[in-house]
Amino acid sequence: MTAPYACDPAGSRGRLVPESESAFRSCFQRDRDRIIHSTAFRRLKHKTQVFVEHEGDVYRTRLTHSIEVAQVARTIAGALGLNTELTEAVALAHDLGHTPFGHTGEDALAELMAPFGGFDHNAQTLRIVTTLERHYAEFDGLNLTWESLEGIAKHNGPVTGDLPLALAEYDALHDLELTTHASAEAQVAALSDDIAYTNHDLQDGLRAGLFSDDDILHLPVIGAAYAEVDARFPGLDWRRRRHEALRRVFGVMVADVIDTSRAALAGSGAQSASDIRHLGRPVIAFSPAHWQDLKQIRAFLFKNMYRAPQVMEVRAHVTRVVNALFPFYLSTPQAMPDRWTDAAAVSDQGARARIVGDYIAGMTDRFALQEFAKHIESH
């Protein structure tokens, strides 16, 4: 049963370019499907999560991460009576704007783009779905509904202060009410991202040998999960033991968000999606105790995975790659494909820098490394 504060596709604020409705799919379903069929979504297959994409066949990429986020988000949204289609659309789109090499690539590109309006992956996602995807006859982008665009822009909360240029430009054209909270569906997508990456980074860190099962037994939730598995399945093969324990950790996190958010929604008095946006506080959350547990787990991952020596060595190399490619394309735009070369044929350096930034941000890990080898290392 759908809750009164869920986003109703029949009440959508519509698309920037009006379209006739589908006879078979709701507007939010169509948003989700357009995201799945976009070029940017396919590229996530070869964009890193923590490890560079080619380092192993089983580590998460941005694509597998996005699918996992969507699965968690559907579960939570369904349990709370929210619109699962909108939730899934926002979840699947949330990382479209990521550069190659994950946050390391973003940090490097943000520094390079600082004189030209900055770079932020959330704003870049909006730029992709409103401008850079160019397949349809009647519009640039995917022409998503207002609700999906709002969720992409502010699923992490209200956006205030100095806006990234990409976000400011679109908001001036199509007001996304950036100073309010997003829908409950978009809030679910944001917390599902936290749940998914915390759990799969634990799995990938263990698989990479950055830490062992014994190293994480002191952490909250995790130690109890391993103890439960050991009591129920003594002598279990270590691979199955690890899987059984970590899937319990996943379940505890999801259940905590559902229970906490159900109580927050009931106590909010909200009777519409608009009420959710104007409450002045999020309604989808972890319990305070579990949030502290999650912070301890993240602190462990930061020290033992994100800042592990072998990871830092790769981070340093890929930073050099981005730092070299940006000035190269800025001075040699003809090295880009025709579409990009033509767009970069402008006298304004800021406009040209944004085209170069768009081009680099869209690269996969492997393509960026190939371009670096071709244009930089070979000379």
Image (cartoon, grey):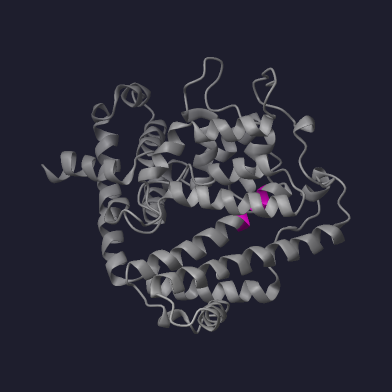
Task: Give residue 378's quadrant in the image.
Answer: top left
Q: Nearer the viewer, residue 374 or 188?
A: 188
Dominant SS of magenta comes to helix
Q: Is residue 219 above or below residue 142?
A: below
Q: Residue 97's spot in the image, x, y percent?
A: 47, 43
Q: Is residue 73 above or below residue 374?
A: below
Q: Nearer the viewer, residue 273 or 1?
A: 1
- Whether the magenta-drawn stretch holds residue 100 is answered as no
Q: Residue 28's spot in the image, x, y percent?
A: 67, 34
The magenta-colored residue range is: 186-191
From the viewer's perspective, is 196 left or right of 349?
right
Residue 363 visible in the picture? yes
Image quarter hosting the C terminus:
top left
From the viewer's perspective, is 375 left or right of 295?
left
Q: Is residue 18 above or below residue 124?
A: above
User: At x 44% / y 46%, what residue is drawn?
Assistant: 63
